[in-house]
Image: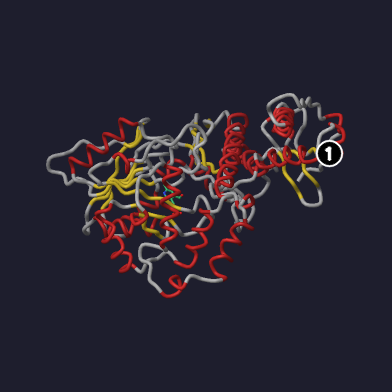
Amino acid sequence: MKTLNHLALAAIKVNLSKHQSTPLYRQLFEQLRELIISGQITANELLPASRSLAQELGVSRTTILNAYDQLLTEGYLISRPGAGIYVAPTIASMEAVSPAPAIKHQPSAPALYQGFSSGPDTQAFPFPLWARCLAKSWRHPDNNLLSEYHPGGYWPLRQQICQYLKRMRGLECQPRQVIVTAGHRDALSLISKLLCQPKDRVMLENPGYPLASRVIQSLGLNTTYCEVDKSGAQPPAQQRNKQAAKVCILTTTRHFPLGFAMTGARRQAWLNYAQQSDSWLVEDDYDSEFIYSGTPPPPLFNLNHNQHTLFLGTFSKLMFQHFRLGYLVVPESLVALAEAIQMELGAMASVHIQPALASFLADRHFSSHMRKMRKLYQHKGNILAHCINQELRPWLAAKTPTGGMHLLALANTDLNDLAVEQQAQSYGIYCPALSRYFQHTAKPPQGFLLGFSGTTIEQIHSNTGILKQILQSS
Ligand SMILES: Cc1ncc(COP(=O)(O)O)c(C=O)c1O
């Protein structure tokens, strides 16, 4: 941590007007943000106490506190107990950040990765709200919760997930169609039992989520892959003597790991493919809560009138990594069978945490929490993209993310991403190589998936510095 310098009141050159329709706190927030972005106020400068600044500017202290609060939420400022509020290392002040520590020796294997994490930012998580939800459901627990079996999930949670998906994704479904799962793997077991016979083929995207491939194979099914181009995954040409895939798992909203949405034409092509080959489509909507520009495209689930589509999601991105609660939305025709299979599989999602999640989703503060996280992740994503394009330009290039919790840094020179990944690992940096996500591809593109959501802004800067030194020396 750098030493913090006190910022003189006179350095805060702002001009607030009570005659504008924009509230005073917003004017102050925007002007302070501009001063930070333009580098007139630089990293690690301590902001004046709210009372003194309020006096200096002739506004109320609440105006100052609201503006500071907004800047904290968006990651421009950092608050440290005992120290005060100071400017985070931001885009403009990047050059002022101390250089990354020189790589002198191989440290021993670190216990924990220090970013680039694509998990949720737990420091911004509303723990008091979550604690209230847990206490509420357990102080006077619902009898039904204590003694009954809930193979499809706890009913109030199924209702809340249904409403949440309606609000967030416009998904057209009924609560009974929502089956609560213990996350992605559990949902894949349920899908395999619901729709497949042993040795059936399941189509996955290439590149795609490697865990899905391993789970499908461990379930005694065969995997087959479809290629991905700029429009998204491509349905394969139908071949006369070849058995079509029984299930196709697609990341339509944001392709994993490439990060773009499937086009409308491609969606239609998949619907046609599913109809002609009598296949089921599974839409893996793993992080679509975090779309930063535009609205996510409508789910295939809504477009598929012959009811051959399932919709898969997780709460790991919203709550905590390894939270182990997710959902599978199934067509009406499969509800009873899905519940019976869950009964047989043992309904892996612990029912006891489900009422708390239901209250959390229903709480009036939930939407503002989501908005806050969206802004925070977008801000961190912008900073990471900027860092890569400034600091790592000879080797990598990144687009400003339009959604999600990681971005793709594509190699623009000849490099071995697996070797760099391994070296970074010994410094506690997790930067998975892009080539890992390709199957049976002779020359996969090189690059890295860099998470930003669960990474602090300071870590983004310092990790980029370390990555630079690794790339320079490789
Ligand atoms: C493509 C994709 N699907 C699903 C998941 C979520 O899995 P889980 O519910 O096991 O956390 C992830 C997590 O990163 C993912 O990347």
Work out whether 9 lies above or below 65. Answer: above
| Residue 420 in picture, x, y percent from top left | 53, 42
Give left or right: position of 4 versus 120: right
Disc 1 Cβ-to-ligand 1 distance below 8 Å = no
Q: Quadrant of residue 377?
A: top right
The residue lying at 69 percent from left, 42 percent from top is 72
User: With 426 as the anchor, is 76 left or right in this view?
Assistant: right
- Quarter in which the C terminus is drawn: top right
Query: Residue 338 in the image: x percent, y percent?
Result: 29, 60
Residue at point 27% right, 41% down?
304
Horizontal relation, residue 56 to residue 444: left or right: right
Direction left: furthest residue: 241
Numbered label tally: 1
The image quarter containing residue 32 is top right
Q: Is residue 308 above or below residue 236?
A: below
Badge 1 marks a residue whose secondary structure is loop
Rendering colour mode: secondary structure
Q: Position of residue 161 (x, y in %)?
A: 43, 53
Q: Position of residue 112 (x, y in %)?
A: 60, 56
The residue labelled by disc 1 is 48
**Residue at the (62%, 50%) spot, across then down:** 114
Frontmost residue, 323 versus 304: 304
Residue projecting furthest to the bottom: 147
Q: Amino acid at mark 1?
A: Pro
Q: Residues within 10 Å of mark 1 (few under 14, many from 20)?
A: some
Nearer to me, 44 or 396: 44
The answer to whether 248 is drawn above or below residue 413 in the figure is below
